[in-house]
Image (tube, helix red, strand yellow):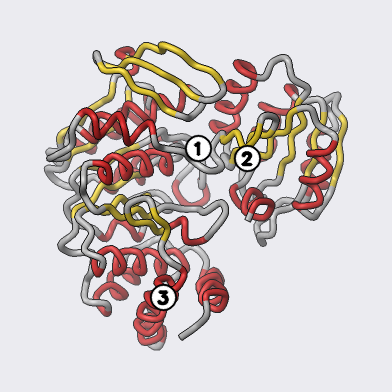
C-alpha cells in the first residue's frame, strides 16, 4: 500500500487530466466500486461563494442531532484530509491510503478503457466509498464546479439542495452570464426535491432557480433576510434573531448571515432536527481560511473573486477602519485579479504579492503592476512563507488573502 505522501502524490498526479465536466467517468468509477453512492441520504450544496461554510454548518447540525454525517468539501487549507470528514473529524491518514488504494485499483482498470478519472472525480469516489463503508446516515456534498456536470451530481435523490450566492466565476467552463452560470448550478435540482436559497440571491440567478424548481416540481424555500435582526456584532462574530429565534455564529460579514439563514431553512426540512440542534451546530462552526481571525492582528481569507473581495472590503470598513493594513496576496491567473484588487488595495497602506505553489498561479510582478496606480508600498516575494514573515514583521494588521492555495502554502 502507498504511504500517505505517496497517496497524495498519486492523487495530485491526476491533475494532469485537467477539469473535464461530465458524469461518464464518475459513473463508471462508482460502478466499478459497487455504486457506494446508493443508499445514503444527501444534502447537496452548489453556488459560487459560501458552499464550504454552508456545507460545514449543515454537517455540524446533523452531527449534533445524533446522525452520523459525512462531509465532502474543497479545497483544503491546512491538511488534505480536511476534505473528507465524518462527524467533524478528518479522515484518518491511514484510512485515506486504504480507500485510495481501493479506488486506484478501479481507476487503473478504467484507464485501460480511456475512462480514467480526473483528480476531483477520484476524490469524490473515495469520499462516497468511505461514507458508505463507515455507515453514515447522511453525506453533505459540496459541488466542485458548477453542478449539472459535477461529479457530485451522480447522486439521485438528495434530502435538500442548497444554492448559495451565485456570481461570475469559472466563466470559461460555466458560461459568460449570471443566468448561464446559475443554470449550471441548478443542475443539482432533482424532480420533487427540496431546494433552498436566500432572498439576497442575485436577481437573475433567483429567476433561474425559481424556474428550475418549477420545471422539476421541486419545493423551493427562499430564506428571507428581512426576517433577520442583528443583536450584537464584533470581529469575533455575530448574534442575531431570525424568525423569533436567537442564534450566534463565530463568522464575519453579511454574506455569512446570508449563508446561515439558508442553512436554518434547510435544516428544518430534515427529519429529527431540533431547534437546539440548529443553534448548537451554527455556534460551533468555525471556518478555516474564511475571514478567520488567527490572532489579534492577523486575518486570513481564501476567497478569490470579486464578490469575495467585496465581502472582505465590508469587513475591513466595519471593523478595521482605524488600522494600517498590509495585504499579503497570491492569486490564480484565471481569476479576475484586477477586479479583486481594485476592491481592496485602496483600503491598505502596503501590499506584498507572492506566488502560491500551483501551476495556475499569477506572477507577483503582474499583480504588482496592477497595484502601481494605488498610492501604497509594494513588495514582491515569490516564496509564500518568506512573504508572510516579511509582511507579518512590518504590519500593524495583516490580511492574507486571494487564494486557498496561498493559505495552504503558508500555514500547512
Quadrant hosting residue 136? bottom left
Q: Which mark is residue 168?
A: 1
Residue under label 2: 336
170 up-or-down from 312: above or below: below
- The mark that comes first in sequence, 1 or 2, is 1
Quadrant hosting residue 245? top left
Q: SS class of the residue under badge 1?
A: loop
Q: SS class of the residue under badge 3?
A: helix
Give percent across and percent down for residue 410.
69, 51
> Would residue 354 be found to the left or right of residue 298 on screen?
right
Q: CA distance from mark 3 to mark 2?
A: 34 Å
Q: SS class of the residue under badge 2?
A: loop
- The mark that comes first in sequence, 3 or 2, is 3
Front position among marks 3 and 2: 3
Residue under label 3: 100
Mark 1 and 2 residues: CB-CB less than 8 Å, in contact? yes
Q: CA distance from mark 1 to mark 2?
A: 9 Å
Q: How would you rate the neighbour count of disc 1 (Cα within 10 Å): few for under 14, some for 14-19, many for 20 or more?
A: some
Quarter in which the C terminus is drawn: bottom right
Amino acid at each position: 500500500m502507498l504511504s500517505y505522501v505517496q497517496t497524495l502524490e498519486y492523487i495530485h498526479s491526476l491533475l494532469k487530466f485537467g477539469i473535464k465536466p461530465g458524469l461518464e467517468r464518475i459513473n463508471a468509477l462508482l460502478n466499478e466500486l459497487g455504486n457506494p453512492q446508493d443508499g445514503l441520504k444527501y444534502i447537496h450544496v452548489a453556488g459560487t461563494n459560501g458552499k464550504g461554510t454552508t456545507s460545514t454548518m449543515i454537517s455540524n447540525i446533523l452531527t449534533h442531532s445524533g446522525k452520523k454525517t459525512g462531509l465532502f468539501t474543497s479545497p483544503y487549507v491546512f491538511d488534505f484530509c480536511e476534505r473528507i470528514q465524518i462527524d467533524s473529524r478528518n479522515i484518518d491518514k491511514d484510512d485515506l491510503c486504504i480507500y485510495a488504494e481501493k479506488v486506484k485499483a478501479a481507476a487503473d482498470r478504467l484507464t485501460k478503457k480511456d475512462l480514467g478519472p480526473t483528480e476531483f472525480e477520484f476524490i469524490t469516489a473515495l469520499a462516497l466509498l468511505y461514507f458508505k463503508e463507515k455507515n453514515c446516515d447522511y453525506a453533505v456534498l459540496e459541488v466542485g464546479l458548477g453542478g449539472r456536470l459535477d461529479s457530485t451530481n451522480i447522486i439521485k435523490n438528495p434530502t435538500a439542495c442548497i444554492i448559495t450566492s451565485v456570481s461570475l466565476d469559472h466563466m470559461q467552463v460555466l458560461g459568460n452570464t449570471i443566468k448561464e452560470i446559475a443554470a449550471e448550478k441548478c443542475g443539482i435540482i432533482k424532480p420533487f426535491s427540496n431546494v433552498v436559497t436566500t432572498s439576497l440571491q442575485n436577481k437573475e440567478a433567483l429567476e433561474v432557480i425559481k424556474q428550475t424548481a418549477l420545471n422539476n416540481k421541486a419545493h423551493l424555500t427562499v430564506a428571507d433576510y428581512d426576517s433577520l435582526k442583528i443583536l450584537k456584532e464584533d470581529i469575533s462574530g455575530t448574534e442575531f434573531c431570525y424568525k423569533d429565534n436567537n442564534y450566534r455564529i463565530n463568522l464575519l460579514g453579511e454574506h455569512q448571515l446570508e449563508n446561515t439563514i439558508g442553512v436554518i431553512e434547510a435544516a428544518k426540512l430534515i427529519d429529527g432536527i431540533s431547534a437546539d440542534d440548529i443553534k448548537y451546530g451554527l455556534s460551533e462552526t468555525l471556518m478555516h481560511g474564511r475571514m478567520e481571525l488567527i490572532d489579534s492582528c492577523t486575518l486570513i481569507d481564501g476567497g478569490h473573486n470579486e464578490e469575495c473581495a467585496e465581502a472582505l472590503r465590508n469587513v475591513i470598513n466595519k471593523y478595521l477602519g482605524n488600522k494600517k493594513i498590509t495585504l499579503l496576496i497570491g492569486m490564480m491567473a484565471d481569476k479576475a485579479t484586477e477586479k479583486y484588487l481594485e476592491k481592496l488595495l485602496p483600503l491598505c497602506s502596503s501590499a506584498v504579492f507572492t506566488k502560491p505553489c500551483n501551476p495556475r498561479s499569477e506572477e507577483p510582478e503582474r499583480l504588482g503592476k496592477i497595484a502601481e496606480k494605488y498610492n501604497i508600498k509594494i513588495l514582491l516575494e515569490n516564496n509564500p512563507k518568506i512573504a508572510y514573515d516579511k509582511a507579518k514583521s512590518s504590519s500593524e494588521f495583516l490580511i492574507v488573502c486571494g487564494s486557498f492555495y496561498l493559505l495552504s502554502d503558508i500555514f500547512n
